[in-house]
Image: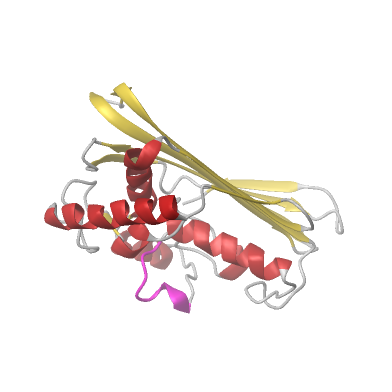
Amino acid sequence: MQEVRRQRLRVIALIGSLLALGYTGSGSASGPRGYFIDPRQLVADRPTDLVEAEGDFTLAIHRRFEGSAELKLLSIAEAIYPPRELLISRAIEQNQVMGSDSAGTPLWWCDGSGVSRVPYCVTLGAIEHYTQLTERFRAHNFRGAWDHNLFWSDFRYDATISFRPHYYLEDSTVTNVYVAEMALTWSFDDGTFVPVSIAHRVVVLSRNGDVLVVKGDGSTEEQVNMSSHRGIGRVEQLMR
């Protein structure tokens, strides 16, 4: 508990430096254009390892980092969000439904609600959403699944961060950076279909926490299998 408190205090202290750099929650001083860091999610509690493997509703969360400095940087990578206007525009253009809870909150999705929400990017908001759904289902509360009993659901999240002397981009090379790599998978069986969402994100940061590059946002892969209760088949698409 003492170590958890110390880490939390260190991350809270980071907010001051981020705000000094212009991280106000509505814009980023050094990240990709329009991206911003959510200060609440920057300091929110997050498990290093959490596994619920028993039963029909399972999850596995694993974060790998070395020391408080890498924890701070990984927290930034999980708390940086794309511009709201971008996701809202995509939803309007493609006639997608985002849900009433999209107001007044950082957006990590531009389609779907509840159990059918599809991640546009991997953020702490997405991780919390699927974790809370899983915990609710494990308690036999199917709110979020239209009160329809699911056969099973599975949520997996893996994140690592490491120092790279050199990191190669498409048109340049950056040196002495930290690279956070995050992967999220969400699937469930409603008795008719088995949707699977697979999202990846890479965030490149300086030692000071400046976000240099965000890759993978908007490239979520969606697979839709037929439930074993209905037949066999699969449809695949690349998100937006």
- The picture quadrant where one finds residue 164 is top left
Residue 123: tell me if it is visible.
Answer: no
The answer to whether residue 114 is left or right of residue 153 is left
Q: Nearer the viewer, residue 181 or 66?
A: 66
In the picture as drawn, the residue positioned furthest to the front comes out as: 2
Question: Which region is colored magenta?
Answer: 100-107
The answer to whether residue 92 is left or right of residue 12 is right
The residue at the point 54 percent across, 66 percent down is 112
Query: Is most of the magenta stretch helix, strand or loop?
Result: loop
The residue at the point 22 percent across, 63 percent down is 26
Q: Is residue 224 magenta?
A: no
Residue 236: tell me if it is visible.
Answer: yes
Q: Is residue 139 above or below residue 172?
A: below
Q: Nearer the viewer, residue 53 or 103?
A: 53
The residue at the point 24 percent across, 55 percent down is 13
Q: Could you tell me residue 155's position as x and y percent?
A: 63, 53
Q: Could you tell me residue 60's position as x and y percent?
A: 63, 48
